[in-house]
Amino acid sequence: MNREPEEIRPADPAAQNGQPAPGEAQSAPNAQTPPPYGAPSPRPPYAPYHPGYTVAMPAPKTAPVRRDRVFFHLLFVVNFFFFEFAYTHKMRLGLTVYFIALFAVTAFYLLPGRKAAPFPLLCGGLGVLLSCGFSVSAEPSVSFLTFAMVELLYLIFAGGVSGTLFHGSDTAALLLDTSAIFFVRPFEEAGALFRRSRAAGEEKDPDAKKLLKTLLYLTVGVMLAVPVLVIVFPLLMRADGAFSGLIERIAENFPSSVGRVLLHLLLAFALLPFTAGMLFSQRYPHKKAKTDDGFAPARGVEPAITCGFLGLLSVVYLTYLFSQLAYFFDGFSGLLPEGFETNAEYARRGFFEMCGISAIDLVALFVALSTMKRQGRAARAAGALAVFVDLFSLVLIGTALSKMILYVKNYDLSVLRLLTSVFMTVLAVAFLLMLIRVFFRRFAYMRIFTVFCACVLTALLFGNVRGFVADYNAARYLSGERETVDVSYLRELGVSAAPALERLVREAPDPEVKYQATSAVRALPEKEGGVFSYTRERSRAARIREALIGENEKR
């Protein structure tokens, strides 16, 4: 049966806004009406599409423009520098080249068009200066700490320039932002490297797309040819002796270098999406409001909880202090307390335990003061307890340092003893900054502590830790303060001890010490080991060895 076509009426604007059209009945009060056009609302489960509903689509991700892609290529080169120069030649001149290239590329990529604050720029300069220390000294423990410090300075530099240090740089909450830049942002923007350009006014390049497709097809063809060549190559080598000899000579002369370079190129390309994603996220950061959680968290821990935590620690520490008063006074006066037969036994007793307690106290104070609310009497009581824990930790550090001074006075200095003393000094400065932070809540302690740590590591690298230890022990022996010197330990210090060994060869009154020092100089490496393995210590040791051997041959 034929039906008459329904009358099609034009859409009324009032009806589109959820109001009944003229002539239509008013809907019930509890009837569900569609939201205004354009407002996000979930679709009903019974209807896959309804013209009255719209779905809020996520904002499209920023696509890289031509300038970004140029810097992506530069980052690929920087990644190759890391694997070829820094990783292969360990922490020496190659690592200096890598970090200088990384800071330079980052600065040229992020700085144009931005006004950076002084502190991020200072961190960038300290990072470059600290990285130059890798070409001066190669102390493993100091180099590892320096590598971590340079990375932190780099993240502060990149985040400060791009404005992604949302917690600021005045408190320990700075570490939250730098951790996000290093561990979260690279994975969020890892796809930026392969994202097509959609910038306004930028047209697609058909030639570039055609070239990319051609390269893809070429790569597929090369991969298909590899299994065939695996079968054909042995047959060709068996068929002709000249071809077999040519392939064998190529395999003998270029196996390590060519294979290493190809591997490092592959690793650099595999790392590129993450390094490019990290820098791309700093170039186009997500807008986020600054927070003041580092000083006064809005949703912090109740002060009573902090009082209970710090109060129990204070009771235990106070009991410990009363039980060790005579022990502390004897240690600070440089006397050997009763119950100990040797200075070594006294110095080793509880030394590393004190270091561990001080480090735990520092972390506890950082967390307690950074997460606690600042209202009420309980907050003031928690501040008083924090002052006591801080002062107790400073007493522990002073006791540990007095033990170390007594130990070094009666025995020779070692690298471990020197680095431990430096570590305790850094802890003491941290506790002093925390003490000021208790009384002055807006005190920017994290900036001062970051710069201080960078300066300490710079002094350790450029001051040559192993060379300083060797010179100290040799000077005490030659001045008559010590009757002997451990030449075998100086020999273990490697190339850094070359100047001290040379001085013993020329000035030692004991012929046995002079003989041992001469043998140690002869055992030094002859060559520096390549351009990117260069350090100032290795170069100087090679010259000292050559000079002393030449003098002995003339005699």
Image (cartoon, grey):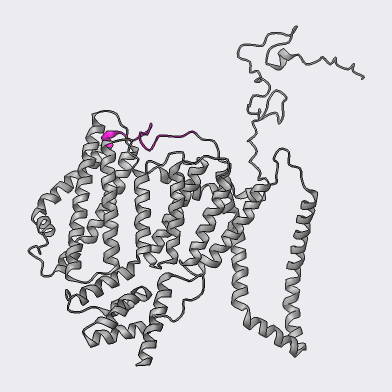
Q: Is residue 128 magenta?
A: no
| Quadrant of the drawing holding the C terminus | bottom left
Q: Position of residue 25 (x, y in %)?
A: 71, 8
| Quadrant of the drawing holding the N terminus | top right
Q: Residue furthest top?
A: 23
Residue drawn at (20%, 65%), measured in percent from left and top?
348
Q: Position of residue 279 (x, y in %)?
A: 56, 48
In this rendering, the answer to whether 407 lies above or below 208 is: below
Provide the residue span drawn in magenta.
Answer: 289-305
Q: Quadrant of residue 291?
A: top left
Residue drawn at (80%, 49%), measured in percent from left and top?
206
Q: Residue furthest front?
A: 554
Residue drawn at (82%, 14%), measured in percent from left and top?
9
In this rendering, the answer to whether 283 lies above or below 236 is: above
- The answer to whether residue 384 is left or right of residue 12 is left
Examine the rendering and report whether any part of residue 204 can be seen: yes
**Magenta segment, principal secondary structure?**
loop
Examine the rendering and report whether any part of residue 349 can be seen: no
Q: Position of residue 441 (x, y in %)?
A: 31, 35
Q: Residue furthest right?
A: 2
**Which residue occupies the foreground of this view, 319 or 464?**
464
Q: Position of residue 36 (x, y in %)?
A: 66, 19
**Which residue occupies the foreground of this view, 527 or 552?**
552
